[in-house]
Amino acid sequence: MGPSTVLLILLGYGGVSTASHKLQYFIAVTPAVNFTSVKLDGEQVEYYNSNITKVISNTAWTKNIDADVPDYRESVRARISGEHKDLQHRLSQAVGAANHTAAHTYQWMYGCELDDDGTARGSDQYGYDGEDFISLDVKAGVWKPAKKTYVTHKWDPDGHYALDQKRYLTEQNGLKKKCIDWLRMYVFYSNESLERKVRPEASLFQKHSSPEVVCHATGFFPKAVMISWQKDGEDVHEDVELRETLPNQDGSFQKRSILRVPAEELQKHTYTCVIQHSSLEKELVLPVSERRILRGRRNTFL
Ligand SMILES: *[C@@H]1O[C@H](CO)[C@@H](O)[C@H](O)[C@H]1NC(C)=O
Ligand SMILES: *[C@@H]1O[C@H](CO)[C@@H](O)[C@H](O)[C@H]1NC(C)=O
Ligand SMILES: *[C@@H]1O[C@H](CO)[C@@H](O)[C@H](O)[C@H]1NC(C)=O
Ligand SMILES: *[C@@H]1O[C@H](CO)[C@@H](O)[C@H](O)[C@H]1NC(C)=O
């Protein structure tokens, strides 16, 4: 089984969320790559991959955590790489694979859930070479091996690990940060009303010998944006194609509007593209006369 299959299995896991909030960690240690995905209410917040050795955010709001908690990303990274070691060590000991760990795949999915009334639940399960190995009955604090043949005395000889995990997943406001504390932090920072506004970067361009002028805004947050065209100060509605707003990798957005206009018209009149966004005190006005002209075949994506 290749790492991509493992990732598909990991990413396919996850239930339907209700009014409660849920934080989940999907972890894989494979011969090719070690990986952790962090999801809040089913959406990936951030991930770590041993090829990059960095925690990469998928949402714009983690910038606010970075600003408030200076060592936030480093503490996440340190915890994740510690967990990769622990997972590999514990599981390889349990299955007796200490001598050939490099050829195996270790998986771990854990998470916690918090209801509006304060009830906390946890889940904790482990896989080995693509098959379920063991899971924790979090409420009872006891292990449930996936197969009768799996011996668990090497896994958790004195039962301490089960109790540690139960506490980590369901307790809160402990001395150490626990799952529910992280969940609360993510829920707080993901609240859009707290979101800082991020300005769009704007550009105007035209493919050489095309009658289409493109006005492009990217990197902005929140999603709502207006892109319009003016001709000698008057709004233009004809021959305008406003494209859908698309998400960027980092949680910001991009959008483009395309104006079809003959070259003679551009010569005779003053055209501008106008961008309005909540991050801007004043609208952005881009004169079409200052557009970039793109030449060559490489711009076929336009
Ligand atoms: C990580 O790097 C290894 C070795 O270079 C490569 O085989 C693997 O596909 C990479 N995985 C990812 C997810 O980038
Ligand atoms: C994955 O993590 C294990 C345990 O820390 C380590 O031994 C191994 O080298 C790592 N693999 C990769 C591809 O980084
Ligand atoms: C690893 O393999 C060597 C030689 O095959 C053996 O002597 C040793 O006991 C093995 N170690 C473990 C932990 O299985
Ligand atoms: C988001 O923040 C606002 C303002 O602080 C607050 O009133 C609201 O309850 C928060 N929403 C959630 C889901 O936490």
Image (cartoon, rainbow, N blue to C red):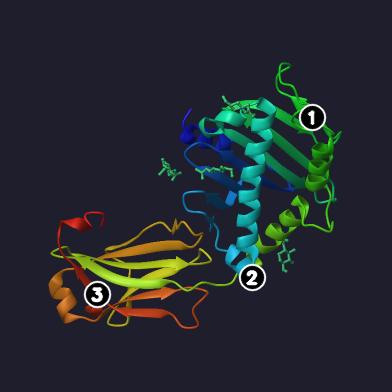
Is residue 19 shown left or right of residue 56?
Answer: right
- Per the image, the residue denoted by label 1 is 143
Dot 2, how many residues are within 10 Å of its Cα: few (below 14), some (14-19), or many (20+)?
few
Select label 3 or label 2 by which is in front.
2
Residue 31, placed above or below residue 42: above
For residue 301, which numbered disc appears in the image?
Answer: none
| Among numbered discs 1 and 3, the one appearing first in the sequence | 1
- The span from disc 1 to disc 2 (Cα, nearest Å) is 37 Å
Q: Quadrant of residue 227?
A: bottom left
| Among numbered discs 1 and 2, the one appearing first in the sequence | 2
Q: Position of residue 156 (x, y in %)?
A: 78, 33
Residue 257, placed above or below residue 18: below
Dot 1, how many residues are within 10 Å of its Cα: few (below 14), some (14-19), or many (20+)?
some
| Of 52 and 277, the residue lying toward us | 52
Q: Position of residue 100 (x, y in %)?
A: 55, 29
For residue 291, which numbered disc appears in the image?
Answer: 3
* Residue at image coords 22%, 79%: 289
Q: Is mark 1 within 8 Å of ligand 2?
A: no
Dot 3, how many residues are within 10 Å of its Cα: few (below 14), some (14-19), or many (20+)?
some
- Per the image, the residue denoted by label 2 is 70
| Circle 3/circle 2 CB separation < 8 Å | no
Q: Position of residue 248 (x, y in %)?
A: 45, 58
Q: Is mark 2 within 8 Å of ligand 4?
A: no
Is residue 302 shown left or right of residue 81?
Answer: left
Q: Amino acid at mark 1?
A: Trp
* Residue at image coords 63%, 56%: 78
At mark 3, the secondary structure is: loop
Q: Amino acid at mark 3?
A: Arg
| Of 121 and 158, the residue lying toward us | 158
